[in-house]
Image: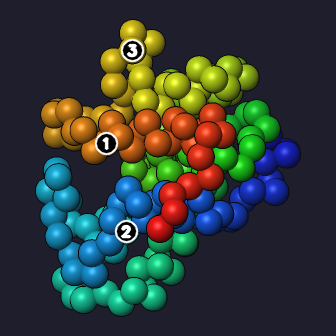
Amino acid sequence: MHPKNKVFIGVVSAALLGGAALWEGVSYTPYKDIVGINTVCYGETSNVQNRLYSQKECSQMLTIRLQEFGTGVYKCSTQPMTQHQYDAFTLMAYNVGITGFCNSSAARYFNRGQIVQACNAIAFTPSGAPNWAYAGGKFVKGLHNRRLYERQMCLGGTSGPTL
């Protein structure tokens, strides 16, 4: 972890919260996601109970989990990171997992200081094919749109959605 990154640990910006809410959506009752995992609130898959959740519980859960995922992103980052890069990488990790992000080409490019390539790798492979846009072995247009959003956020082109 780069020492300059310590300032962001635990910070959940409005852009990050808004991006998570935009792309995850919210459900106060548990459901099975696209690959059959029990999910509730804003994409939460950990310790999901078969009950009705409140808006307050979901918001608190999202904030706590984004802090955890942001910390995970920092643990595998070796370069200084801007807020929009942090937001984009944390949003990606929230969807693909910390290990998924840390083992991704986006993280590898970032750690080599290749920032534009890192941001592009969120959404595209080196050959230009969609990256991180598959679930259950199938291309999912919504995931690709999310990756495009995260890429743009990483490049500094969006401060998050207007909700």
Nearer to me, 37 or 133: 133
Q: Is residue 96 left or right of residue 87?
A: left
State whether residue 10 is above or below residue 77.
below
State whether residue 38 is above or below residue 159.
below
First of labels 3, 1 by sequence position: 3
Residue 73 visible? The answer is no
Element at label 1: helix
CA–CA distance in space, label 3 to label 2:
30 Å
Residue at image point 58% right, 26% down: 118
Q: Amino acid at mark 3?
A: Gly
What residue would you read off at disc 1?
A: 143
Q: Position of residue 121 (x, y in %)?
A: 49, 25
Q: Position of residue 133 (x, y in %)?
A: 30, 35
CA–CA distance in space, label 2 to label 1:
15 Å
**Dot 2: within a 10 Å radius of its alpha carbon, few (fewer than 14), some, or many (20 or more) residues?**
many
State whether residue 115 is above or below residue 31.
above
**Dot 1: within a 10 Å radius of its alpha carbon, few (fewer than 14), some, or many (20 or more) residues?**
some
CA–CA distance in space, label 3 to label 1:
16 Å
What residue would you read off at disc 3?
A: 128
Residue at image point 54% right, 72% down: 63
First of labels 3, 2 by sequence position: 2
